[in-house]
Amino acid sequence: MFYDLSDKELKAIKIIRNFLVNQGRIPSVRELMTGLDYKSPRSSAILLKNLEEKKILRKKNDGSYQIVDFEIPEDFGSRAQTVKIPLLGSVACGMPIFADENIEAEVSISIEMIKNGYKYFLLRAEGDSMDEAGIENGDLLLVRQQQNAENGDRILALIDDEATVKEYNKSNGMVILKPKSSNKIHQPIILNENFRIQGIIENIIKL
Amino acid sequence: MFYDLSDKELKAIKIIRNFLVNQGRIPSVRELMTGLDYKSPRSSAILLKNLEEKKILRKKNDGSYQIVDFEIPEDFGSRAQTVKIPLLGSVACGMPIFADENIEAEVSISIEMIKNGYKYFLLRAEGDSMDEAGIENGDLLLVRQQQNAENGDRILALIDDEATVKEYNKSNGMVILKPKSSNKIHQPIILNENFRIQGIIENIIKL
DNA sequence: TGCAAAGTGTATATTAGCGTATGTTTTATG
DNA sequence: CATAAAACATACGCTAATATACACTTTGCA
C-alpha cells in the first residue's frame, strides 16, 4: 500500500491532501509541478501516474483523480497524517474573512479531525466576545465553514465585525443567538434572517 | 577493525562517514571519485567493492550501501565500553521504523549514555522539521524508544512520515505538539488521542 | 453567439547523472 | 625485465527531469 514511496511522491501526497481540504479539488498537473519545484509538467504527470499504479490515486469515470482512502494498519498508529488549516488573525472590519491579510499562519491538524469535503479554518479566541462556556482567551477554535446550522449548534458569527461564538436558535423567521450562560454581560442577540453564519465550531483547542 | 586497509580505503571511509552525517547518504561513485582524486569512476567503484569484501560496507536489500561500524568521535570515551545503536536514515513510508532498509549504520555509543532495559536508536536531524531549540542540521539525536510521554517531554513523532521533534502536551483528549518557539514557520501540530509517539529525545550529539 | 485567451492533460525529444563494463596505460614489485 | 595491481579513458543502458509542442476544454467578453 504505501511502502515504497519516494520523497517526491510523499511530498506530492501532502500537497494533494492540502489542496483537497483548502480548495476542494485535486491540483492540476501544473499546480503540482510548481508545488514540487518541477519545471516541466511532464514530471508531475508521470508522478501522478506512478501514484495511480501504486494505488494511492484512482481515476474516476470522468478522468479526474481521486485519492484512495487508505487505512493505516494498527501498528502504524503512530503515523499521524495532517493537513494544513489556515489560522485567521483578528477578523478585520468588513474584510472578507479569508483575505490573505487575515491568514496568520497554517497549523497542521490530524486528518482524523477533518470531515471530507468541507473547508475549515482556525480562529484565535480573544477578548470576551466569545466568552462562552469553555472558551478562554487564546484558545484556538476549529471552525467548519458552512452557512447553515441546526438549532443548538455552536456557531461562529460576525456581529459588528467581531467574531462571536453563540448557540444558534431559529424560530418564526427570527434568529436568536444565545450565550451558553446568561448573565448580565452576555445577553442573547436577536437578528433577522439575512445574516450569515461563518461556520460551526467543531473543536476547541487549548494551547 | 581497520587493520588491513590501504590509505585510499581509509580516506574513502572518512569521506563516506562525512557524507553520511552531512547529507544523509552514501556518496555516489563519482562523488567518491572526486573526493579521492580519482579520474575514473571505475577506481572508486572497485574501492567500494573491496570495502564490501572487507566487511566495512554492506549492501542492503535495495542495493544501496550501508556502513557497518561507525565510531562516534573520540571525546565520547574511546576507552569506555560501547554499545552499537542503529542509525536510522530517512524514515521510509509505511515501513516499520526499524526495517533493515532504514538502518544506515551501526554507531558505537558509550554505555554511559544508555539506560539499561531500553531500546535506543539514533536519528540524523535534517531539514527544519526538527528545528527545535538546540537542534541543528546534522546533529544526531539519541532517542529512547517508548510510547508514552509526560507533558513537557521532548519527543520524536512521525508526522506525515517525517521525523519531527516537538514538546508533548496532552489535554482534553487532544495531543498538541508544540514547537519551542512559535513563529510563522513553527506552529503547533494538533492531533487526536490515538496516535503514538516513537520515543523521547535523550541526547543531542553534535558532530 | 462567436471567438480569443488561458488553462487543461498529454506527447516527443533532449539532457544529465547514475552504476557498471570494456579495454588500455601506468605504477610498483619480484 | 616480467608481471600483477592500480588507475586510466571511454562507453553503455537506465532513470529522472528538462524544454517545448499539441489538441482539447473552459472562461470571459464583445
Image: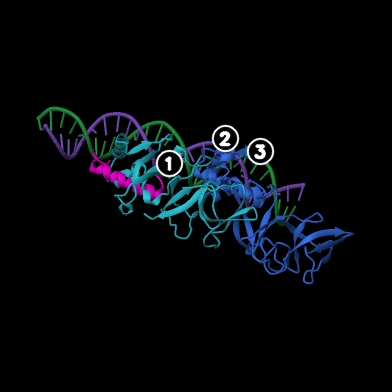
Chain colours: A blue, B cyan, C purple, D green
Amino acid type, mark 2: Glu
Q: Secondary structure at mark 3?
A: loop
On the image, numbered disc 2 is attached to which residue?
Answer: A53
Amino acid type, mark 1: Ile
The quarter of the displayed image where residue A129 is located? bottom right
Q: CA distance from mark 1 to mark 2?
A: 27 Å
Amino acid type, mark 3: Gly
The residue sitting at the right extreme is A172
Residue B70 place in picture, x, y as percent: 34, 45
Rendered residue at 68%/36% (across/down): A61
Is B14 placed left or right of B95 in the picture? left
What label sits on residue A63 in the rendered view?
A: 3
Magenta residues, as a range? B1-25
Q: Secondary structure at mark 2?
A: helix
How would you rate the neighbour count of disc 3 (Cα within 10 Å): few for under 14, some for 14-19, many for 20 or more? Answer: few
In the image, residue B183 above or below residue A50: below
On the image, numbered disc 1 is attached to which residue?
Answer: B103
Q: Secondary structure at mark 1?
A: strand
Q: CA distance from mark 3 to mark 1?
A: 40 Å
Is A183 placed left or right of B190 in the picture? right
What label sits on residue B38 in the rendered view?
A: none
